[in-house]
Image (tube, rainbow, N blue to C red):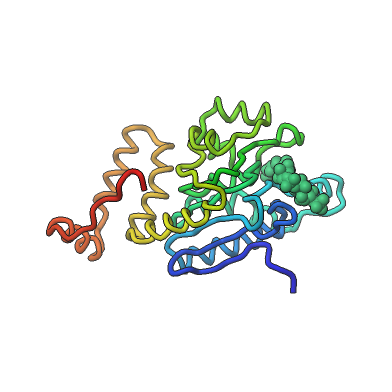
C-alpha cells in the first residue's frame, strides 16, 4: 500500500497532522486535500488541539503545479466533489472549527502552503523558513483564502509586495510581518509547536472554541456589534470546570502566568 499523503497521529489530546509528499515538497494536489480534510475532521472529533507540519525538508510548496497544468490542458478532469472538498472548505474548518491549530513551519512555505499555514491560529517556524506568494510568476492567483487571511495577517502593503514581486521573506521577516510568533533554530519548529499545543490543550475546550471563533468574527464587525458579541460570549453559561478554575485562582492555587520569554 502506498504511503498516505497526510499522516495522522494522536499524541495525548494533540492531533499531529503531517503533509507527506516530501519528494514533491508537499505540494498540494486534489488527493492530498481529500486526506487533509479527513485528518482535520478526525482531529475535531478526538483532539483538543491540531498541529500541522510538513515531512521532509519543507512545509509546503503550494499548489501542485503539474496537476494544475494537467487540469488547465484538459488532461485530467477535477473530481466531481471538488467544489465541496475544495481548499476553502478545508482551510476554513481549520481556521473556524472547534479546536485551535498550531503550525510548525520550515523550508518553503509558499503559495497555498502559506495559505494553509495562515489558517492555523499560532505559527512557529525555524530559521530555514522562507515565505512567499509566487502566484504572480506562475500566472495564477491565490485560491486558498490568502486574500482574506494572509492580507489580514501581514496587511495589504506587504501582501502586495509579496504577490507583485514574488520575493521570499526569511524567518526574521516572517516574524516582523506576523506570519509567525516564534522562530526556533533549524529543526526546532515541531518541538516548539508541540510544547505550545500541549499548553493550549490545558485551556477549557469552550474557551479555546471561543478564542478561535469569536476573535476573527469580531474583526468583521462594527465596534458596537463587536462589544455586544463579546458580552454575549463572556456572559454565556459557565460549565463547572470554570468555577473550579476561578476558585483555584481566588484561593491562590492557580499556576502563575507564563513568563513572556517562553
Ligand atoms: C512541485 C512543486 C509544486 C516542487 N508543484 N511539483 N508553488 C511554487 O511556485 C513553488 C514551486 N517549487 C519551488 O519553487 C521549489 O520546488 C521549492 C523552493 C519549493 C523547493 O526547491 P528544491 O530545490 O528543494 O526542490 P525542487 O528540485 O524544485 O523540486 C523537487 C520536486 O518537487 C520536483 O519534482 P521531480 O519529479 O522533478 O523530483 C518538483 O517538480 C516538485 N515540486 N514544488 C508540483 N508546487 C489554490 S491557489 C495556490 C497557488 C499556489 O500555491 S502558487 C505557488 C506554487
- Residue 67 appears anywhere in the view: no
**Residue 79 to residue 137: above or below:** below
Where does the N terminus fall, quadrant-wise?
Answer: bottom right
- Residue 71 place in picture, x, y as percent: 81, 49
Q: Residue furthest front?
A: 185
- Residue 261 appears anywhere in the view: yes
Q: Residue furthest bottom?
A: 1
Q: In the image, what residue occupies the spot 74% across and 56% down?
A: 23
Horizontally, residue 154 falls left or right of residue 254, namely: right
Q: In the image, what residue occupies the spot 86% across and 49% down?
A: 74
Q: How many marks?
A: 0
- Residue 238 place in picture, x, y as percent: 24, 59
Viewer-side residue, 12 vs 98? 12
**Residue 69 to residue 93: above or below:** above
**Residue 123 to residue 169: above or below:** below
Horizontally, residue 108 falls left or right of residue 9, namely: right
- Residue 116 place in picture, x, y as percent: 58, 48
- Residue 227 place in picture, x, y as percent: 30, 38
Horizontally, residue 198 falls left or right of residue 15, namely: left
Viewer-side residue, 31 vs 202? 202
Answer with the quarter of the image where residue 52 lies.
bottom right
Amino acid at each position: 500500500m502506498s504511503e498516505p499523503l497526510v499522516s495522522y497521529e494522536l499524541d495525548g489530546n494533540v492531533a499531529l497532522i503531517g503533509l507527506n509528499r516530501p519528494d514533491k515538497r508537499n505540494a498540494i494536489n486534489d488527493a492530498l486535500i481529500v486526506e487533509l480534510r479527513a485528518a482535520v475532521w478526525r482531529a475535531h472529533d478526538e483532539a483538543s488541539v491540531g498541529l500541522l507540519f510538513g515531512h521532509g525538508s519543507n512545509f509546503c510548496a503550494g499548489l501542485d503545479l503539474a496537476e494544475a497544468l494537467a487540469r488547465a490542458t484538459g488532461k485530467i478532469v477535477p473530481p466531481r466533489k471538488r467544489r465541496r472538498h475544495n481548499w476553502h472548505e478545508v482551510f476554513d474548518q481549520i481556521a473556524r472549527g472547534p479546536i485551535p491549530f498550531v503550525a510548525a513551519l520550515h523550508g518553503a512555505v509558499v503559495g497555498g502552503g502559506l495559505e494553509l499555514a495562515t489558517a492555523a491560529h499560532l505559527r512557529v517556524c525555524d530559521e530555514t523558513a522562507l515565505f512567499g506568494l509566487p502566484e504572480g510568476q506562475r500566472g495564477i492567483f491565490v485560491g486558498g483564502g490568502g486574500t482574506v487571511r494572509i492580507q489580514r495577517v501581514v496587511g495589504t502593503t506587504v501582501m502586495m509586495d509579496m504577490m507583485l514581486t514574488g520575493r521570499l521573506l526569511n524567518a526574521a521577516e516572517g516574524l516582523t510581518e506576523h506570519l509567525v510568533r516564534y522562530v526556533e533554530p533549524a529543526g526546532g519548529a515541531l518541538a516548539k509547536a508541540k510544547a505550545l499545543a500541549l499548553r493550549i490543550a490545558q485551556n477549557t475546550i469552550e474557551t479555546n472554541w471561543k478564542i478561535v471563533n469569536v476573535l476573527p468574527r469580531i474583526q468583521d464587525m462594527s465596534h458596537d456589534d463587536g462589544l455586544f458579541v463579546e458580552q454575549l460570549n463572556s456572559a454565556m453559561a459557565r460549565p463547572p470546570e470554570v468555577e473550579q478554575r476561578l476558585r483555584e485562582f481566588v484561593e491562590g492555587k492557580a499556576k502563575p502566568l507564563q513568563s513572556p520569554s517562553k
